[in-house]
Amino acid sequence: MFKWGILLFLAILACAAPLASAAPGQRRHLVYFKGTPQELDVYFIQGRSKGSTVMILGGIQGDEPGGFLSADLYADLALKKGSLIVVPRANFRSIIHFRRGLEGDMNRKFDGVPAGDPEGAVVEVLKSLMAQSDAFLNLHDGSGFYRPVWESEQANPGRYGQCIIADADVYVHQPSGRRIELERQALKVVERVNREISDPRHKFHFFNMFTTREDTRHREQRKSATYYALTVLGIPAFGIETSKNLPDLESKIFQHNLAVNAFLDLFGVEVELPRIVLDKPILGYVVISVNGALTLAAADGQTLLLTPGDTLEVVDVGSNYERGLSVQVLGAGGLNDFRRPLAPRSPTDIVVRKDNAVLGRVHVDFLPEGERGGPPLLVGEGKIRPSHAAGEAAGDIPALAALALQPSLPSGEGVPVGRPLGEIPASPAVARASGTGGIAAFLLEVDGRPMRLAPGEQAAVPLGARLRLVDLESAGGPLPSGVVMNLRGFVPARHVSRNTGEDRGAVADTSADLLPSFSEGGKGEVYAVNAELGRTILASCSLKIMRPVLESVTVRVEGRTRTLRRGSRTHIPPGAAVEVLSATLAGGLAPQNPRFTLGGRPFPSSLPQTLTMRGIALNLAVHEGGHLAGKVTWVPW
């Protein structure tokens, strides 16, 4: 059983993703709770010019595919102006089961989560993402058709489909004094969307739940994500509801897109309408690492033969879809075992799903008694279906033998795709050359900043940083032909089909792209960077991937410099000018790309910055490499 208490603890440490440090016009992808049923993909998209940040949330209820499939389309957009935070599948576990919720309604947990609730960690991440946004959109599919007055059993004030929901007509956020014209904004969107809908039965309406009033009929909405975003964070927040009674899924997605695009235009985010892609999901292959060494590409229907005690880990799935994929090792793991090492004790199946649809399965069995102790085998005729672009025909290629990949292994520890099973060699020990092998230094970049490491050196790198492998520096004279620079546990996208071990020029996301099974001791902390010539390691350095932890923040208040330790509370007079001078991380970790928020609102990351103390308690939070490093609290006196 998955240890939800650990999950919640890790989520509190991460405390949600900060707005990505992507350059203008770029996109960043972070994954929380990887390899668990609650895996949470978050996409940060930065426009070429600055503007408002809008958060799009889908799938908080798992039986509403119009919402989460519409949100899914926005994860790949390029923006001219503004930014997006896109969470296509907020409740992946309920989506896999195609149920509204498995631990109650996640959209009723934003006023507080009971201790031990396994969804609490996800809710905390979503709250932190909202705090980085200027507007919030929650995408749903509702029953029937909302109408302000009774028309029929399916069209009346008690239905939710085809409407824009808000919690008030006008709301004044007391901490900030911000006046939010919810009804005016929603009516603009309704008018624009309805111009595109020809069937009068499917027109949108504005649904004001009056949640902020004492006489509201919808008090349960005070626990919702939109109510939290509006009343706690002071940002415009809307629910977009298409009807479950629309004739087909494409209609739901299309009308969600119309409403989302109208809101983005309203908030000044310039984006093109995404194309609706509903191609039938296809399983191409399942990449399985056995005992952290040999990696096999299995086809749908094949059988993987192991020795008892062997560990398997599904490290990749080839499909015509990138998102919404999950893997379940029946009887050995949980609901989502993607990238999770497991040791099956009895014959079982590896089941691959896209959302709640089964794409295929790989059988797992054990070698006969006399053959145990040998290498794992793939047997049986499966079908490898290449992952093509949407709309292209995908042919079938017989898979009569194992296909093996090299996850950044030195030459000889793996084999290229297509090599017959009988030719797979045993994994030989790698010869290590003495000295530095003619290598003077390893040249890297961490979040765009250069780093030079001598052979044998180790450097701390923040979890979530983008690491670029630049080059090898010779100690004198040209390097031998064929020398590669290999980050162990990393496979660049260009090498997924045939990994040469050469990682120069590639960029690795240290929170998403490294395989823990290839780290030192399998702990996912220390990764080797090697200079390799064939099976020989000429020289090596290492990187220690560290979760950034704030040590202190230095400020100047009324001419006095203070060092504020992580977690401390400091009294500051209301109205005082507070100059934030610097932030220091623990463990000697150098800040690479720090970001700061005060009271949940970001301020420029170039220090020093002068801020004004308000009449309420405020948290100054320091984020680094996609993670919350820590915070200090300012209290008025």
Image (cartoon, rainbow, N blue to C red):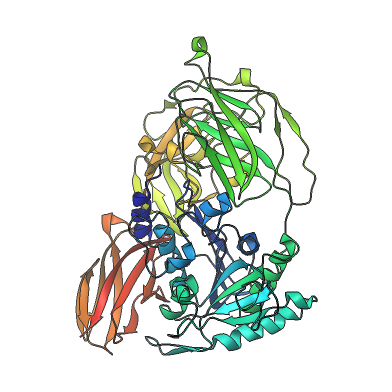
Residue 442 seen in render: yes
Residue 101 percent coordinates (x, y): 51, 57
Q: Residue at x 53, y 40 (%)?
A: 328
- As drawn, the residue found furthest toward the top would be 370
In this rendering, the answer to whether 534 lies above or below 583 is above
How many numbered marks have been drawn onto this rendered protein structure?
A: 0
Residue 512 percent coordinates (x, y): 48, 50
Q: Residue at x 45, y 36 (%)?
A: 341
Horizontally, is 4 left or right of 561 in the view?
right
Q: Residue at x 60, y 67 (%)?
A: 140
In this rendering, the answer to whether 512 lies above or below 485 is below
In this rendering, the answer to whether 541 lies above or below 563 is above
**Quarter that holds the N terminus:** top left
State the image quarter where residue 584 is shown. bottom left
Residue 502 seen in render: no
State the image quarter where residue 28 is shown. bottom right
**Quarter that holds the C terminus:** bottom left
Of 559 and 319, the residue lying toward us: 319
- As drawn, the residue found furthest toward the front would be 153
Horizontally, is 133 left or right of 163 in the view?
left
Residue 27 percent coordinates (x, y): 57, 62
Horizontally, is 360 left or right of 19 in the view?
right
State the image quarter where residue 305 is shown. top right
Of 173 and 573, the residue lying toward us: 173
Of 612 and 579, the residue lying toward us: 612
In this rendering, the answer to whether 591 lies above or below 511 is below
Residue 417 percent coordinates (x, y): 64, 31
Horizontally, is 337 left or right of 244 in the view?
left
